[in-house]
Image (cartoon, rainbow, N blue to C red):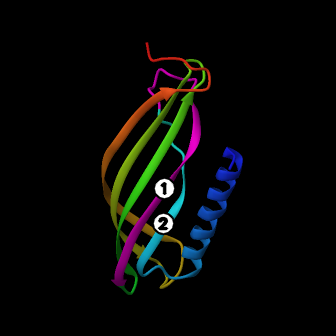
Amino acid sequence: MTEVRKAFAGIVLGVGLFWTGCFLHAGGPKLLGGLAWGKYAAPWEMSNVSKPGHLIGIGYEWGSGRLAYEVEAIYFLKTSSYPSRGWEYEMGEISVPFAAKYEFLPRSTPFVLAGGEIAYILSNKQKPGPSGGNSV
């Protein structure tokens, strides 16, 4: 599958999951998936190109009335390439966000979401890109 097709499939999946969550009141268990774009770069490196990675996870929401709580466990794979140096990076991460959600009207959007996150970087890989450069 080409990169364009993978990106398109991820976008379709992400949009579909987003709109499904908007129309169905999110309560109980949920399955998360989609694309992960990240500007994985040092501040002085301006020539990087963000590439789509992916994310997948599970979550659970509970509460009553207008106030609900949610917790999720998400795996991200973020990728970037640096054509000027011939590098590609991949970073795998586990994220556990937790939040409280207040709905202005029951079972509707918009809503206010506030919380925090605990994250752990699982892997950080540098590999030669298409131009075959090295890190030195």
Location of mark 1 (residue): 55
Q: Which residues are magenta?
A: 41-63
Badge 1 crowding class, 10 Å Cα cut-off, few under 14, some 14 to 19, many 20 or more, is many
- Position in image of residue 18 (x %, y %): 58, 68
Element at label 1: strand
Q: Amino acid at mark 1?
A: Leu
| Picture residue at 66% right of the left edge, 62% below the top | 12
Q: Main secondary structure of the magenta part?
A: strand
* Side of 41 relative to 81 (left or right): left
Numbered mark located on residue 78 in the image: none
Element at label 2: strand
The answer to which of 117 and 33 lies nearer the viewer is 33
74 over 26 or under it: above or below? above
The answer to which of 119 and 10 lies nearer the viewer is 10
- Position in image of residue 135 (x %, y %): 45, 17
Badge 2 crowding class, 10 Å Cα cut-off, few under 14, some 14 to 19, many 20 or more, is some
Q: Is residue 11 magenta?
A: no
Tell me the CA gap for discs 2 and 1: 8 Å
| Picture residue at 35% right of the left edge, 54% below the top | 95
Numbered mark located on residue 32 in the image: 2
Q: Residue reaching furthest top?
A: 136
Q: Earlier in the sequence, mark 2 or mark 1?
A: 2
The quarter of the displayed image where residue 125 is located:
top left
- Position in image of residue 44 (x %, y %): 47, 20
4 over 23 or under it: above or below? above
